[in-house]
Amino acid sequence: MYRTKTCGELRLADAGQTVTLAGWVQGVHDLGALTFVDLRDRYGITQLAFNEDTAAELKEKAQRLGREYVVQATGVVAERYSKNKNLPTGEIEVNVTELNILNESLTPPFTIEDNSDGGDDIRMKYRYLDLRRNAVRKNLELRHKFAFEVRRYLDQQGFLEIETPILVNSTPEGARDFVVPSRMNPGQFYALPQSPQTLKQLSMVAGMDRYFQICKCFRDEDLRADRQPEFTQIDCEMSFVEQEDVLQMFEGMSRHLFKTILNIDIPTLPRMTWADAMKYYGSDKPDTRFGMEFVELKNQQPDNASRELVESIFPEGFGVFDSAAYIGAICCEGQAVLTRKQIDQLTDFVKRPQIGAKGLVYARVQEDGSVKSSVDKFYTQETLQVLKDKMQAKAGDLILILSGDDAMKTRKQLCELRLEMGSRMGLRDKSKFSCLWIIDFPMYEWSDEEQRLMAMHHPFTSPKPEDVPLLDTDPARVRANAYDMVINGVEVGGGSIRIHDAKLQQKIFEILGFTPEQAQLKFGFLMNAFKYGAPPHGGLAYGLDRFVSLFAGLDSIRDCIAFPKNNSGRDVMLDAPGYIDQSQLDELCLKVDLPEA
Amino acid sequence: MYRTKTCGELRLADAGQTVTLAGWVQGVHDLGALTFVDLRDRYGITQLAFNEDTAAELKEKAQRLGREYVVQATGVVAERYSKNKNLPTGEIEVNVTELNILNESLTPPFTIEDNSDGGDDIRMKYRYLDLRRNAVRKNLELRHKFAFEVRRYLDQQGFLEIETPILVNSTPEGARDFVVPSRMNPGQFYALPQSPQTLKQLSMVAGMDRYFQICKCFRDEDLRADRQPEFTQIDCEMSFVEQEDVLQMFEGMSRHLFKTILNIDIPTLPRMTWADAMKYYGSDKPDTRFGMEFVELKNQQPDNASRELVESIFPEGFGVFDSAAYIGAICCEGQAVLTRKQIDQLTDFVKRPQIGAKGLVYARVQEDGSVKSSVDKFYTQETLQVLKDKMQAKAGDLILILSGDDAMKTRKQLCELRLEMGSRMGLRDKSKFSCLWIIDFPMYEWSDEEQRLMAMHHPFTSPKPEDVPLLDTDPARVRANAYDMVINGVEVGGGSIRIHDAKLQQKIFEILGFTPEQAQLKFGFLMNAFKYGAPPHGGLAYGLDRFVSLFAGLDSIRDCIAFPKNNSGRDVMLDAPGYIDQSQLDELCLKVDLPEA
């Protein structure tokens, strides 16, 4: 070893010891007769001291050290004259008696500090320098610990980690596959797995009973801000279970993770039906760190979220409300103080094309209990008092109202508004966690594009037994044995109880519009396997990147990935993808056929 | 849950309990008034009993159960009349009071038994049934445990598991890459990693200090018996270490694995130089479960294995020996009893084209101490006694001698003969383990094909400091800071201390025949990273599949892989690779261009 101690471990009790440290030069501080060097490694920073009186030559050498030089220093631990309370090693320094430069460094293109001066692009290009930053490194440490604790919990519960192949065939997730040409099978391609869904179900058919895997998955999609072409999944499956068993098992895992990693005891996870989530939060992943639930002021469009008709509380008069199928509102506590300008900003916010509301109606509850609204000219104070009561609003509160002719779309707009208000009101603290299960998802959702019902989860999801008769009469109303775990408005995981009955599976395929031939072609090997004694089974998968990001309080999953790709799917550090030799293409029997510029 | 107990846990102490089990029907045995059903799950087998007197209808239902039906049975645990000592549950049975068929099964295409009647092909096609076999399942359980214990050890030692990307650029390992066309970057390709070598070195530059990863690696090579296009590596790297530190750390890991998984205390690993391994075993991965080391009877061709000239112990007379550059022999204890026919078989063995010896000379030491050999007519008994002494052979031993004009080739032939004799003599017991380090590998090996020196390990391997001067004078003699861990003749892992000095790296590239421009083109991003303060570092990688196979006593790595590929790189269960739609090819700007049939 080039060191006897790391840069993070020396304390006052070590004073007098001779130690050897190795690490990177964080900075050199010249104080006349003394020169101090901050030496950094993964474990911390230790101050090296060079004294002109005792070691003039060494001091001179230290003065010439550049940032990020790699050095080895031997010396005696001593109590510091001026202690640094912010550093665990801040009570000591090392009086250096020997200094070796192990490697020099060019001046790094950005500062290796928590708040670096480097922009995103340059930090990604020099990711190996970016990772030296404390703020980035600790995310990877957290990720390591997180994955380790996942494994520890699941191992204790009798799960086997089974590696499934990366070179597979197309998977039924429906996104675009990455493909890999096979040289040994010319003209044929492997696909990279979008998830090990079929293989984990086959593991259950194989009697593995409890399977998990922390594995890479791949989707060739146009990348949004928080997507990566390759991402990591905690993939799990259990046999002989019902939904309750899966929920209990993985609630236990979350409890274990929160406790061992963040030392937080989370309460029993509430369960919310998909219908309630949509009705009260306009989202299947509600952020429940705060309330501000929707109140339906009018609903003339019963759907899967709510079958209940609600008469409008507003008498005829305001055309927008009169013609709306749905009017919903949230009550923002204490927000009556918002200025007209601030409310205009909110109006602009909901009118942005990504959200698409037509406008925003507000009502302030004044100190005297009277209500002042943007629709005063259409409604009496009496009506506004009904609104106030309905919203359970009190003096100082602000009521925000959206309406529209599509209930579901309006709910989604109101969801965005609620989240925005939550943020503005400081109700979305990243150090607070609110976890819940969303259950009873619909089996299907209507696709305008495809003009047919599509599987909301995937085609192997089982319907709730009590809803099976509806498959024949009103399939759109069938609920699934499917569930998501949601934390702070983020869907961290989800899954379902699978169909293990071949006849039921056949029926589901029919409803999805597959002919038996198409179903056989697409899912044949799985359906064949199911003929040989498939056990009842179910499971779920977590997005590791998202889950870790949440624990780390990050805005983007990218920050907890060691070597992420940018929005064009490029690794700018490796400069991948790149061009390959014609000879390699020839071996693969492929020709690149670029469209003309 | 569909069960209250598994099929592996009931004991006599549970008698009287009402339990519910679920699993697969292993077999139905009809004994007149009684029917027994063996119910199997991952955890074991439990006997279900159906009595005509108490439950005639149930008994009839049980009789109609087919093999591999999935059933749920509730009943009372009772002591068995005739106990089965071979089963942990063999003292009890369950008198069934309720039986539900959860799923039926077609008759499986082979028996689900330890010794199945299914051939390799059919078992691979129905791998989900093959995995139900005890013999296969326990390999996956072992693999899970193995990987878990690797992680536990490395976590305790402060290693961080850092996931590196799968979609990367070409790696410098030199085998053929699998490539992935990028739709977002038309005409460009990702490569799948042959190993995370460069990324783990970048992690060290990034200050991660101790990295590991259990990860998939990919090589598009023509598959030999025991190769898979995707395989799993335990990849490790440490900073600020010398070779000794790496050896200690990973010897510790092996000790941990042997102890926790097999409950075996392994002794301190001996270290053998590559030269000695070649000289005494003819292999850089000697099987040291048994001795039978080579004795050089003549060596006129000094090389990296041995620089020592050995005068022939044989006087002139036998042309084959007279003209040989090298004569080597092994002494097989007690094997003088081999018949002429058996020795002829050995002669045929070494003359097989894969081995390529010209012939085999033998000498038996008789009971009276005299030596009887196949070259008696050329040599006096006196010479043969010299041979006997040199070989330290005693009465009843058999001496086997190979000669040739290429010392290294002859050693490799003698190695095969030694292993064959070890097998025949029962010295290669799979439940015994002999571990060692091979150290001091040569930096380079001569490639007849390329007519130049090639890196034996990879181009980032550092030379031994004391051999650096030889780089200028006799590079072929330079030894590397490289090491392999060998167990029972299998190279389970290997690695090296890397070069962290840019100037030394430049020199190594020169010797390998790279111009600075070529080196920059091929390894530029790594060399650039090294300019920003690369610490001294080194590491190694284990082949997980091989390591686990060894622990499991398997002949092929395939048996410890859940879903392996065949020798054409096909997954016959998934039927991958396969053809993809033209539309998908179009999106990738690719054309398949098959040679005409």
Image (cartoon, coloured by chain):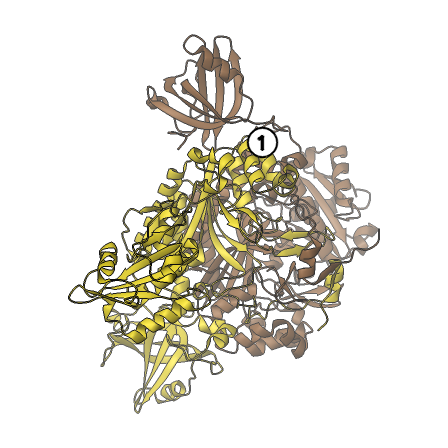
Chain colours: A brown, B yellow
- The answer to whether residue B362 is above or below residue A320 is below
A316 w.r.t. A167: above or below: above
Crowd tier of the residue under label 1, counting other residues whose Cα lies within 10 Å: few below 14, some 14–19, many 20 or above = some
Protein chain holding label 1? B
Most distant residue in the left direction: B368
Question: What is the quadrant of the N terminus of chain A in the image?
Answer: top left
Residue A317 visible, this angle: no
Q: Is residue A566 toward the left or the right of residue B9 in the image?
A: right
- Looking at the rendered structure, the secondary structure element under dot 1 is loop
In the drawing, does residue B139 fall left or right of residue A169?
left
Q: Amino acid at mark 1?
A: Lys
Q: Name the residue carrying label 1.
A: B531
Q: Image quadrant of residue A442?
A: bottom right
Task: Kindly indicate the quadrant of the structure image that contains residue A494.
Answer: bottom right
Q: Position of residue B224 (x, y in %)?
A: 50, 64
List x then y, in percent, for residue B318: 34, 62
- Residue lying furthest front in this view? B317
Is residue B152 found left or right of A357 in the rendered image? left
Q: Position of residue B174 (x, y in %)?
A: 57, 51
Residue A420 appears in the rendering: yes
Q: Give percent across and percent down for residue A80.
A: 41, 16
Nearest the viewer among B373 and A538 is: B373
Residue lying at 53% horizontally and 35% vertically, measured from the top left: B205
Q: Looking at the picture, does residue B278 appear above or below residue A473?
A: above
Farthest residue to the bottom: give it.
B32
Residue found at x 69% / y 60%: A586
